Amino acid sequence: MAPRGPCPLLFLTLVLLAAGLAQLIRPPDSYPKFVREHVDFPKSRPPKGQSYCDHMMQLLSQSMGVCKLTHTFIHAHASRLRTICTSGGRCNKYNECDSNAAYPLTICRVRRSPRPPRCVYTGTSETHQNSHEPLGGHPSPIPCGP
């Protein structure tokens, strides 16, 4: 006996709508976001009278609306970093990968009370194998998710 009434049609409509929305709503790809926020190659030159970290963090905070306490910029080509996600790194079960090679970085840390647009930063240049945000003084892995 075939189902009768509006319920089967409503159910089918909801299933098709959910399937269509699932196709449209995808989680953001974390690697392009990582590149936008962390890769600065070749290393930018700040305007006269402004430090590298003050300049770069000002650009970053325009889109964020807050002063980050710390942020790392990697001075290597994005395609070189992408190899970390394939043959050039060690990945964990969350698809976050540490590099086998060392990369030049600038780590920017806030010096004064974080109130945009008056964030003041100090920067240190270093070379690390792992690539971005220092957590407990150590850079954390690159997101290599799908």
Image (cartoon, helix red, strand yellow):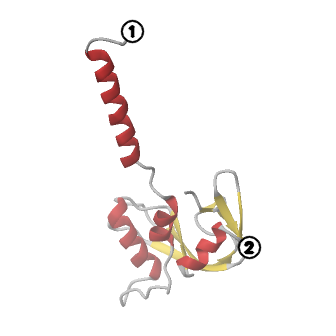
Vertical order, 42 against 101 (above or below):
below
* Placement of the C terminus among the 4 image quadrants: bottom right
Residue hosting label 1: 1
Kindly check if marks 1 and 2 are in contact, taking CB atoms under 8 A apart as contact: no
Q: Where is residue 68? Give x, y as percent.
A: 46, 61
* Placement of the N terminus among the 4 image quadrants: top left
Q: Which type of secondary structure does the marked residue at label 1 adopt?
A: loop
Residue hosting label 2: 100
Mark 1 vs mark 2: in front: 1
Q: Could you say which is closer to the camera, residue 70 or residue 7?
A: 7
Horizontal side, residue 44 vs residue 75: left or right: left
Q: Could you say which is closer to the camera, residue 94 or residue 136?
A: 94
Q: Is residue 77 visible?
A: yes
Which residue is drawn at the image coordinates 71% and 71% (left, top)?
A: 87
Q: Could you say which is closer to the camera, residue 17 or residue 66?
A: 17
Q: Which type of secondary structure does the marked residue at label 2 adopt?
A: loop
Q: Where is residue 5? Give x, y as percent.
A: 26, 12
Q: Total label count?
A: 2
Which residue is drawn at the image coordinates 45% and 50% (left, top)?
A: 27
Q: Amino acid at mark 2?
A: Asn
Mark 1 or mark 2, which has the lower sequence index?
1
Q: Amino acid at mark 1?
A: Met
Q: Could you say which is closer to the camera, residue 92 or residue 46?
A: 92
Residue sitting at the far front = 1
Which residue is drawn at the image coordinates 71% and 68% (left, top)?
A: 89
How far is the residue under mark 1 from the one under mark 2?
64 Å
Horizontal side, residue 86 vs residue 108: left or right: right
Q: Where is residue 124? Give x, y as percent.
A: 58, 78
